[in-house]
Image (tube, helix red, strand yellow):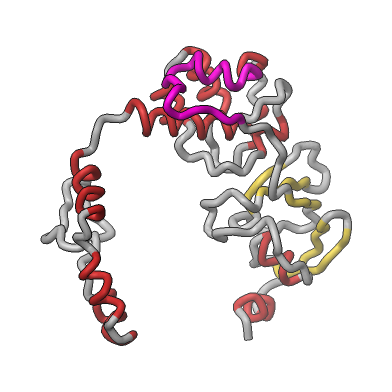
Amino acid sequence: MSTTEAESLTSKMIPIFIMGKKYEVPDSLTIMKAMEYAGYKFVRGAGCRGGICGACGTVYRKPGDYRIYVGLACQTMVEPKMYLTQIPFYPANRQNFDWEEIKADGGAVGQLYPELYRCVACNACTKICPMDVEVMDYIAMIKRGDIEEAKRISFDCIQCGLCASRCMGELPQYHIAQLVRRLYGGKMAPDTPHLEQMVEQIAAGYYQDKLEELKQMSEDDLKKLYSDRQQEPHQADEYWKPESNEGL
């Protein structure tokens, strides 16, 4: 018996409407599980199933409510008589650029995405964001030339594209946000000596023998090695460090 089938035995059945068609589903399911319960097979619009990839953006309405609601199908629970449809991909222009030539400033972003200045500050983008990102705020930071702050505000963006679906200025906000994070990480963030050291070790073949050793181990030995590894405690503070950096 599957998890979904087991849940259906202990749950109340409720009506929902998927793209106009009525289905009876258990009230304990997420939208994604409810759609699968109803017979849908996900070919697109499903990825991590953990609220990270942004592939399952869903728009829905509730009976008697004029507002449009949004959520991730893998995280949002079904509600009686909700009327939903998925928008797993929203078309928006993404510009190409020369990484070596582009500058890490707001002007360079504006040259690639001149629609940036069409923003009318309506805040519809923020209202529809399933991750509660202050979308309008990071757009404002880019226009001010503050790439670092725009990076910080947009950090939780999962590229679902729902912001672009509601934008009066027709901005591809999520592509713009991804660009500023790349600019900050590649051209503005402080150098990380430990990362450079790791790259040098890999290039020198430091891990090759270790990989060959792992490939020769039995499945049981690999499982034991994995379960016995040192793990960061759940309540560790920011100063926690492993006893050894071997293998890291």
**Residue 2 place in picture, x, y as percent:** 62, 81
Quick check: 35 left or right of 204? right
**122 and 202: which one is in front?**
202
**242 and 190: which one is in front?**
190
Q: Which corner quadrant of the image does residue 207 belong to? A: bottom left
**Residue 60 place in picture, x, y as percent:** 75, 47
Instruction: Count numbered badges in the picture.
Output: 0
- The stretch of residues the image draws in magenta is 95-115
Q: Residue at x 60, y 78 (%)?
A: 3
Relative height, residue 137 to residue 28 (above, below): above
**Residue 196 place in picture, x, y as percent:** 23, 43
**165 and 217: which one is in front?**
217
Q: State the quadrant of the N terminus.
A: bottom right
Q: State the quadrant of the C terminus.
A: bottom left
Instruction: Indicate yes or no whether the magenta region holds residue 101.
Output: yes
Q: Residue at x 50, y 13 (%)?
A: 107
Relative height, residue 41 to residue 18 (above, below): below
Q: Residue at x 48, y 33 (%)?
A: 154
Instruction: Indicate yes or no whether the magenta region holds residue 20.
Output: no
Q: Residue at x 72, y 35 (%)?
A: 165
